[in-house]
């Protein structure tokens, strides 16, 4: 059987796709999507919750919108981060233990393609799950938003508000509903999970157990939420060149997850600037490429 | 002709990560296998058989020496297009069916579309798993797993099959089926490099064998040459009357220097007896 020599070069898209699809199928058949049923129950349950908010007339009815958004995005965050760390950390040790890795690497499969395929498979699963959750969140938010809008406009009419004021009220309520901004928050959640999956992949290249990968992965996640503050304390603005270098190295080794905190601002109805989104995309790409490259450096030399 | 396998002075030393004494798993081993040959590597547990095979597949890097497959360095990815590998006790992905397993490995080797479907069907037929093609591997028996493992090893029509303990844990019937499959590979001109503990099976299928012990190759050669006892001759007679046997014994006794060591009924093997009483009885 002959094939073009280029087929054996790393980063072959077809081969990576085969591995990614396989990983996706493997995780789906591990019944990971059962979590979506839990999510549906939580979001539908959120309809009946009332978060404490100020009861000013202009805020009438908006509590439910905050509740649904907070609960949905919270669930999405938990699900995507747990899946990114645990699923990625599970795959490599399992392949080594079951010796399926031998049969794959004994085929003309470069190790880099194997790693990227596994990572993309997990990332695809997280993406599909987040899409399903987003759809459900939007389906719940749409009727609530129009209900709140009607309520507030009726109140404004009763108070004799001008058409301009009513238009402003409608705009404000719409900003709390299923906006493009809110979909961007889901995108940011997804990007954060991509980074964590890349971190877990790196960990699993030198760890031999899923437990170790999961524990260290969650530790890195925890540090990631606070490391920007820690950098500020230890290497503040007056720390000099050495301090700045140390701060930079720390940011590369451990991902700075505070970058992704703009999700909270979006939930509050604040507008996400295109520049901020592009910045997050750029940082995500940097982290993913860095961790995948480091994974390959370790994995390429690994003996089985 | 270019050898299918060329291992030259292979040495592999494992250095424990937490310190401790380095372990020399393979020590200056050289093996050359001609295309179309069936070569058996035998040796006790921990003698270096699997490490030699892994070095040939690029799963471990040699400490010194070289491994080549049809002239290509075994550490290079392209050398693996010509190799099919069946590891010892393979598990594979339980969530895939037999057909999906072959399709997955076929796609990794660049096969697509109708040619992949045809190849999958052909191999499932070859290993006798056509009826189990849509069953998940989680429900396969040990023998079936070995056979699907052999099928995945052959998916890209490799010129070399490397089989690590292909009959480990398989019952005598499954073991015989795998033996027959190895012989059919030989008929197709595929080079086979196997290691096994079942010496009788190695004897049945291999053209040449190497005996490895404590990482070193201690004997190697054609099976017939290694097994022949130079100073003895075997005569097997059918329906010989007792008086003829007595005459032969007298003739030998009369000749100075020659000695009749043993005469009696040749024995079948326990494996042959088992197969005759089971499979052959079921399918007379």
Image (cartoon, coloured by chain):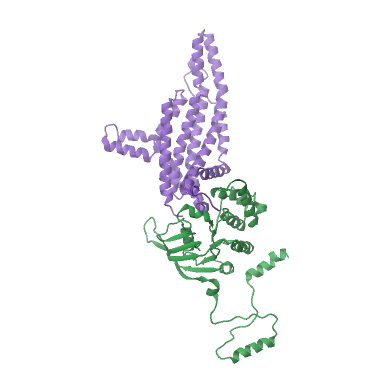
Chain colours: A purple, B green
Image mark count: 0
Residue B252: image quadrant is bottom right
Classify A119 as above or below B131. Answer: above
Classify B237 as above or below A253. Answer: below
Task: Pick out the residue farthest to the right.
Answer: B284
- Residue shown at the point (35%, 33%) measured from the top left: A229
Residue A190 relative to residue A229: left or right: right
- Residue shown at the point (53%, 50%) measured from the top left: A3
Evaluate whether residue B165 shows in this view.
no
Evaluate whether residue A34 shows in this view.
yes
Residue A302 relative to residue A50: left or right: left
Could you say where residue A287 lies in the image, as x and y percent from the top left? 41, 38
Q: Quadrant of the C terminus of chain B?
A: bottom right
Residue B257: image quadrant is bottom right
Could you say where residue B202 lies in the image, as x and y percent from the top left? 56, 67
Could you say where residue B141 lies in the image, as x and y percent from the top left? 62, 56
Task: Pick out the residue farthest to the front.
Answer: B1
- Residue shown at the point (48%, 34%) measured from the top left: A190
Classify A207 as above or below A170. Answer: below
Classify A82 as above or below A7. Answer: above
Could you say where residue A252 lies in the image, as x and y percent from the top left? 37, 39
């Amino acid at each position: 059987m002959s094939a073009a020599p280029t087929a054996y070069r790393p980063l072959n898209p077809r081969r990576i796709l085969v591995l990614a699809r396989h990983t996706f199928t493997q995780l789906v058949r591990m019944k990971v999507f059962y979590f979506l049923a839990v999510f549906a129950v939580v979001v539908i349950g959120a309809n009946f919750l009332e978060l404490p908010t100020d009861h000013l007339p202009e805020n009438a009815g908006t509590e439910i919108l905050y509740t649904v958004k907070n609960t949905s995005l919270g669930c999405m965050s938990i699900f995507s981060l747990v899946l990114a760390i645990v699923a990625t950390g599970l795959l490599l040790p399992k392949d080594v233990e079951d010796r399926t890795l031998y049969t794959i690497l004994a085929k003309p499969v470069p190790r880099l393609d194997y790693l990227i395929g596994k990572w993309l498979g997990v990332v695809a699963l997280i993406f599909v799950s987040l899409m399903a959750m987003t759809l459900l969140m939007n389906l719940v938010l749409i009727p609530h938003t129009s209900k709140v809008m009607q309520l507030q406009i009726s109140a404004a009419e009763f108070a004799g508000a001008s058409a301009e004021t009513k238009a402003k009220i409608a705009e404000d309520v719409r900003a709390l509903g299923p906006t493009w901004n809110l979909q961007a928050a889901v995108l940011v959640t997804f990007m954060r999970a991509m980074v964590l999956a890349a971190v877990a992949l790196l960990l699993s290249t030198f760890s031999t157990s899923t437990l170790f990968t999961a524990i260290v992965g969650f530790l890195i996640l925890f540090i990631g939420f606070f490391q920007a503050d820690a950098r500020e304390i230890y290497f503040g603005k007056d720390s000099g060149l050495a301090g700045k270098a140390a701060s930079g190295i720390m940011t590369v080794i451990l991902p700075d997850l505070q970058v992704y905190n703009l999700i909270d601002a979006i939930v509050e109805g604040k507008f996400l600037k295109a520049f901020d989104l592009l910045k997050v995309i750029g940082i995500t790409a940097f982290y993913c490429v860095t961790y995948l490259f480091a994974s390959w450096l370790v994995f390429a030399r690994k003996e089985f | 002709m270019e050898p299918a396998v060329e291992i030259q002075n292979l040495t592999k030393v494992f250095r424990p990560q937490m310190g401790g004494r380095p372990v020399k798993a393979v020590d200056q081993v050289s093996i050359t296998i001609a295309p179309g040959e069936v070569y058996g590597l035998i040796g006790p547990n921990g003698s270096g058989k699997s490490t030699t095979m892994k070095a040939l597949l690029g799963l471990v890097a040699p400490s010194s020496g070289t491994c080549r497959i049809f002239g290509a360095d075994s550490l290079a990815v392209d050398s693996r297009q010509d190799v099919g590998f069946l590891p010892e006790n393979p598990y594979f992905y339980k969530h895939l069916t037999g057909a999906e397993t072959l399709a997955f490995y076929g796609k990794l080797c660049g096969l697509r579309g109708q040619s992949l479907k045809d190849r999958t069907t052909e191999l499932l037929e070859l290993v006798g798993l056509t009826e189990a093609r849509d069953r998940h591997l989680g429900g396969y028996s040990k023998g079936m797993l070995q056979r699907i493992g052999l099928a995945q090893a052959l998916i890209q029509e490799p010129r070399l099959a490397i089989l690590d303990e292909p009959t480990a844990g398989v019952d005598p019937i499954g073991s015989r089926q795998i033996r027959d499959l190895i012989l059919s590979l030989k008929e197709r001109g595929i080079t086979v490099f196997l290691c096994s503990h079942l010496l009788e099976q190695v004897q049945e299928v291999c053209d040449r064998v190497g005996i490895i012990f404590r990482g070193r190759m201690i004997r190697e050669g054609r099976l017939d040459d290694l097994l022949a006892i130079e100073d003895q001759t075997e005569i097997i007679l059918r329906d010989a009357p007792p008086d003829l046997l007595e005459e032969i014994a007298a003739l030998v006794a009369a000749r100075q220097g020659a000695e009749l060591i043993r005469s009696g009924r040749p024995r079948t093997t326990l494996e042959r007896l088992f197969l005759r009483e089971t499979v052959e009885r079921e399918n007379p």
